Image (tube, rainbow, N blue to C red):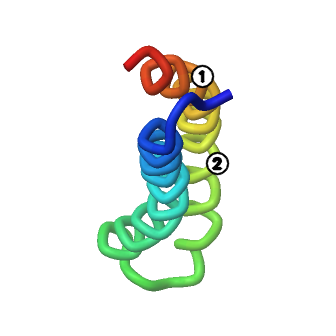
Amino acid sequence: MFESKIQRILYALIMAFLCLGLFLYFFISLFMNLIDLGFNPSVIPIWIKSWAVKFFIVFPLILILTPIDKNIVLSN
């Protein structure tokens, strides 16, 4: 599948960036909603709704970018 150790490392770094980005996005969206709306009981439902909408945009992009990433790494 991978031809060299460098390609495996490069692929792992890019995938870690994508997955970590998704994980951090979860917390960043929470904190930004807390900053914008203040801390009150209505923040959590608003945050979950906004995060879910954005997740359905981000997750398919990760699924699309993963094979592209693999092809870029293997072509070098």
Q: Residue at x 43, y 50 (%)?
A: 13
Q: Residue at x 44, y 15 (%)?
A: 75
For label 1, count other residues whose C-alpha is less than 10 Å away and answer few (under 14), some (14-19) or many (20+): few
For label 2, count other residues whose C-alpha is less than 10 Å away and answer few (under 14), some (14-19) or many (20+): few
Residue occupied by mark 2: 52
Q: Could you tell me residue 71's position as x and y percent?
A: 52, 18
Q: Closer to the camera, 30 or 46?
A: 30
Give the answer, above or below, for where 29 lies relative to 56. below
Q: Could you tell me residue 22's position as x and y percent?
A: 52, 53
Q: Amino acid at mark 2?
A: Ala
Q: Could you tell me residue 39's position as x and y percent?
A: 44, 84
Q: Closer to the camera, 49 or 42?
A: 49
Residue occupied by mark 1: 67
Q: Could you tell me residue 38's position as x and y percent?
A: 37, 79
Give the answer, above or below, for where 24 lies relative to 43. above
Q: Residue furthest right?
A: 1
Q: Closer to the camera, 54 or 44?
A: 54
Give the answer, above or below, for where 44 lies relative to 20. below
Marks 2 and 1, how far apart in space? 24 Å
> Earlier along the polypeptide chain: callout 2 or callout 1?
2
Q: Residue at x 46, y 64 (%)?
A: 24
Q: How many marks?
A: 2
Q: Return the mark for residue 54.
A: none
Q: Secondary structure at mark 1?
A: helix
Q: Residue furthest front?
A: 4
Q: Nearer the viewer, mark 2 or mark 1?
A: 1
Quadrant in the rendering for residue 72: top left
Q: Amino acid at mark 1?
A: Pro
Q: Residue at x 53, y 72 (%)?
A: 43
Image quadrant where one finds the N terminus: top right
